[in-house]
Image: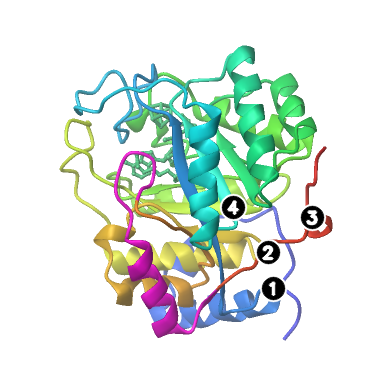
């Protein structure tokens, strides 16, 4: 079979045609693409930590951390360095190779950025890859993070440009694209994806994947989250997505972005093992691992280890420094 071309010119009708394929045909195509670029039995394992929780000024309709929603979440100040290092060590001991730190900010102040940089350097010193998600970044801040050795920056498009205003009003889809540009141009690996099950139409899901695939470079990591419904948020109680439709989204993401890590992200506690197995078959090859996401639960590490055993999956080893796309200071 010929090497699939890495494309950045996907048309909406082509993407919708992929979604319309019989399920077996779609999964077969996705699995073929997956095997051309990855070991099909290897999964990248990341652990998350909320380094600054709650009281966020943004109004994201899905989020437990927005100051505008009454979710009963206790706000916390930026965690001390020692606590972050202890959590990273614990994650490493359980088998995670990437440590992702999230802050409930619209954007970091330069002062806070310096504190996060100390965390990045301390976590890298443990031999782990680092990822942070801190909200909007200026071009200068992205360069500063790159110089500090950051491996990945997570910033999700979340949904289609057309549906965006139904979910978030305090920033625009274009703002997100702008931050991704700063991150990419600074030479940091991009982690960008979105959330499914927020009441969006099938066309919005196709549009979100089109926007991701038609970025100047495919994000190196593409987290696909299933909405975790949090009481007190505007999206609590919304009709969720058909699980098989979720699997189709994973498969289409894999086909559009053949070399990206596609992460089966939030929402796994509500998924059966069998549904997760279908997601891996569709080309997902990364997960969040450990009992906590940012503010909500994730499956127990023991359960995930058992699932990996049952499926014959292996956690990807930590990449040697020289193999990293980005190796910083
Ligand atoms: N404040 C920063 C920002 O929004 O860019 C970083 C942290 S924010 C919590 C990171 C991402 O988590 C969001 O963009 C969203 O895609 C995802 N997320 C947040 N709450 C979620 C939920 N309830 N269910 C699924 N994904 C969620
Ligand atoms: C992403 O796409 N999903 C993660 C990470 N990037 C930062 C966050 C999921 C958050 C789920 C809800 C919570 O725990 O607050
Ligand atoms: Fe704030 Fe990020 Fe939550 Fe939006 S998703 S409310 S920006 S923490």
Answer with mark 1 or mark 3, whichever residue precedes in sequence. Answer: 1
Answer with mark 4 or mark 2, whichever residue precedes in sequence. Answer: 4
Q: Is residue 305 magenta?
A: yes
Q: Could you tell me if the residues under marks 1 and 3 are in contact, i.e. CB atoms within 8 Å?
A: no
Q: Examine the rendering and report whether any part of residue 43 can be seen.
A: yes
Cα–Cα span, label 4 and label 3: 13 Å
Cα–Cα span, label 4 and label 2: 18 Å
Q: Could you tell me if the residues under marks 2 and 1 are in contact, i.e. CB atoms within 8 Å?
A: yes
Answer with mark 3 or mark 2, whichever residue precedes in sequence. Answer: 2
- Mark 1 lies on residue: 37
Which quarter of the image is occupied by the N terminus? bottom right
Answer with mark 4 or mark 3, whichever residue precedes in sequence. Answer: 4
Q: Residue at 69% x, 52% y: name it.
A: 127
Q: Nearer the viewer, mark 3 or mark 2?
A: 3
Disc number for residue 98: 4
Cα–Cα span, label 4 and label 1: 20 Å
Q: Nearer the viewer, mark 4 or mark 1?
A: 4
Q: Which residues are magenta?
A: 292-314
Disc number for residue 259: 2
């Amino acid at each position: 079979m010929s090497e699939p071309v890495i494309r950045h010119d996907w048309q909406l009708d082509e993407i919708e045609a992929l979604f319309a394929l019989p399920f077996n045909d779609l999964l077969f195509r996705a699995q073929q693409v997956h095997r051309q670029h990855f070991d099909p039995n290897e999964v990248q394992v990341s652990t998350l930590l909320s380094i600054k929780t709650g009281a966020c000024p943004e109004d994201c309709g899905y989020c437990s951390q927005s100051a505008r929603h009454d979710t009963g979440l206790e706000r916390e100040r930026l965690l001390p360095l020692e606590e972050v290092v202890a959590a990273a060590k614990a994650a490493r001991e359980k088998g995670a190779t990437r440590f992702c730190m999230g802050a409930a900010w619209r954007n970091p102040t330069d002062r806070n950025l310096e504190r996060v940089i100390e965390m990045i350097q301390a976590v890298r010193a443990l031999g782990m890859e680092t990822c942070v998600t801190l909200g909007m970044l200026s071009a200068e801040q992205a360069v500063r993070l790159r110089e500090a050795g950051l491996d990945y920056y997570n910033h999700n498009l979340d949904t289609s440009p057309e549906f965006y205003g139904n979910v978030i009003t305090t920033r625009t889809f274009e703002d997100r694209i702008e931050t991704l540009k700063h991150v990419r141009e600074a030479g940091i690996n991009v982690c960008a994806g979105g959330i499914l099950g927020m009441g969006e139409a099938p066309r919005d899901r196709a549009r979100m994947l089109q926007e991701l695939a038609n970025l100047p470079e495919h994000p190196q990591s593409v987290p696909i989250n299933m909405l975790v419904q949090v009481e007190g948020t505007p999206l609590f109680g919304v009709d969720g997505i058909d699980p098989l439709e979720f699997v189709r989204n994973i498969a289409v993401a894999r086909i559009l972005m053949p070399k990206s890590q596609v992460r089966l992200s939030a929402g796994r506690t509500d998924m059966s093992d069998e549904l997760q197995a279908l997601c891996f078959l569709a080309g997902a090859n990364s997960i969040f691992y450990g009992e906590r996401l940012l503010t909500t639960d994730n499956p127990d590490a023991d359960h995930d280890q058992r699932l990996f055993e049952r499926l014959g999956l292996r956690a990807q080893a930590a990449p040697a420094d020289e193999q990293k796309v980005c190796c910083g200071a």
